[in-house]
């Protein structure tokens, strides 16, 4: 047993060393910068400022997080935008992904071709799909505006990606279009493992399909479904590219990752930018832990 453990660590050592160099060192350096006033224009000269980047009058959490002033700051707005985007998009993607997976799990002619076609939006790179939808939703030349005008649903063209009233929800719509296939693929994999005899017995007994779904299908796939939701939630909380390409640096849609990029690159503030990046990591970690704990408690209650 001891020899097997030594062999395992021997094989793991190169990977662990590579991860420490590629991921560990930059992470630790970013955390260190968050306690300094480092500027990108003079990165060699900086001074230690402690938690000022987090909690001073000009730090990220300078105003109390419970106060209205905090949520009016760029950082507060980015937190609101990120969670609004994440919660709505993940909810829609889960519901639609479940519906698509249930459909693809049925036997019908050409099912293999349909399964392949469904994956196309997910296979398209995010930057490409964002630029494509940017043109489709363009307020002057976009197809969507022209179709809505022709149908008489709107009286004037809408700037979907520029108007603050529409921009964030437009990004949500594009993200749902792109990511539903991913959720459907994960859920379909879980559906394929379910025992057939349960459904045959339900069919013989004449049980309504909706009741079979709620009492049989959903309980059996709840854990794979939870894994899919957690993966998607973590990915949504760090969203950057889709929002940046569609709406650029708009304050009405900026995400936490977008705030980090703007503070570091555009403003050159490596200190506060690193503090924002560290806070983003902590927020994602805490959100994932709370979600997993809440889901586990709910599952335990249902089991009892």
Image (cartoon, rainbow, N blue to C red):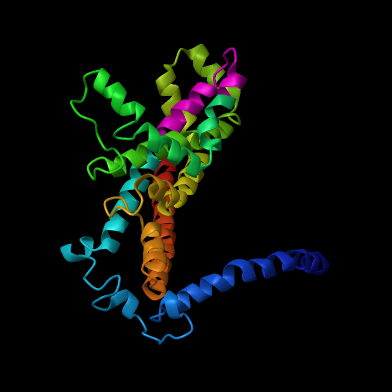
Residue at x 40% of width, y 58% of height: 257
Would you say residue 186 is visible in this rendering? no
Residue at x 18% of width, y 25% of height: 155
Residue occupying the far right of the picture: 3
Residue at x 49% of width, y 22% of height: 103
Residue 250 horizontal/vertical position (percent): 30, 52
Residue 156 horizontal/vertical position (percent): 20, 29
Q: Is residue 262 above or below residue 272?
A: above
Q: Is residue 289 left or right of residue 112?
A: left
Residue occupying the far front of the picture: 140
Query: Based on the displayed image, in which of its 4 quarters is residue 99 positioned?
Result: top left
Would you say residue 44 is visible in this rendering? yes
The quarter of the picture where the C terminus appears is: top left
Q: Is residue 158 left or right of residue 88?
A: left
Residue 229 horizontal/vertical position (percent): 45, 44
Q: How many marks are shown on the rendered structure?
A: 0
Residue 147 horizontal/vertical position (percent): 31, 22
**Magenta highlight: main SS:** helix
Residue 98: within the magenta? yes
Q: Is residue 1 left or right of residue 291?
A: right
Q: Is residue 39 above or below residue 152?
A: below
Q: Nearer the viewer, residue 173 or 94?
A: 173
Residue at x 36% of width, y 73% of height: 272
Q: Nearer the viewer, residue 129 or 36?
A: 129
- What range of the chain is rendered magenta? 95-115
Residue 82: within the magenta? no
The quarter of the picture where the N terminus appears is: bottom right
Query: Based on the displayed image, in which of its 4 quarters is residue 10 positioned?
Result: bottom right
Q: Is residue 72 left or right of residue 200?
A: left
Q: Is residue 169 above or below residue 144?
A: below
């Amino acid at each position: 047993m001891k020899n097997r453990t030594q062999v395992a660590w021997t094989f793991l050592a190169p990977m662990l060393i590579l991860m420490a160099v590629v991921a560990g060192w930059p992470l630790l350096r970013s955390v260190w910068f968050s306690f300094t006033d480092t500027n990108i224009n003079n990165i060699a000269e900086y001074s230690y400022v402690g938690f000022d980047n987090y909690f001073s009058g000009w730090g990220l959490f300078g105003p109390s997080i419970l106060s209205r002033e905090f949520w009016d700051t760029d950082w507060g707005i980015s937190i609101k935008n990120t969670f609004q985007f994440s919660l709505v998009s993940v909810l829609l993607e889960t519901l639609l992904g479940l519906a698509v997976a249930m459909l693809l799990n049925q036997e019908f002619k050409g099912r293999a071709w349909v399964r392949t076609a469904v994956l196309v939006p997910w296979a398209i790179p995010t930057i490409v799909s964002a630029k494509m939808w940017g043109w489709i939703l363009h307020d002057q030349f976009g197809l969507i505006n022209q179709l809505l005008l022709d149908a008489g649903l709107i009286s004037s063209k809408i700037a979907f990606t520029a108007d603050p009233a529409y921009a964030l929800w437009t990004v949500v719509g594009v993200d749902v279009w792109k990511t539903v296939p991913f959720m459907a693929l994960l859920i379909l994999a879980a559906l394929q493992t379910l025992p057939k005899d349960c459904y045959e017995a339900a069919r013989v007994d004449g049980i309504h399909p909706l009741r079979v779904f709620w009492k049989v299908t959903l309980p059996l796939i709840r854990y794979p479904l939870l894994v899919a939701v957690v993966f998607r939630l973590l990915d949504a909380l760090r969203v950057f590219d889709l929002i940046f390409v569609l709406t650029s640096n708009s304050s009405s849609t900026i995400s936490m990752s977008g705030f980090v990029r703007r503070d570091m690159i555009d403003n050159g503030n490596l200190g506060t930018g690193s503090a924002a990046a560290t806070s983003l990591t902590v927020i994602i970690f805490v959100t994932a832990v709370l979600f997993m704990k809440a889901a586990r408690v709910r599952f335990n209650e249902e089991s009892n």
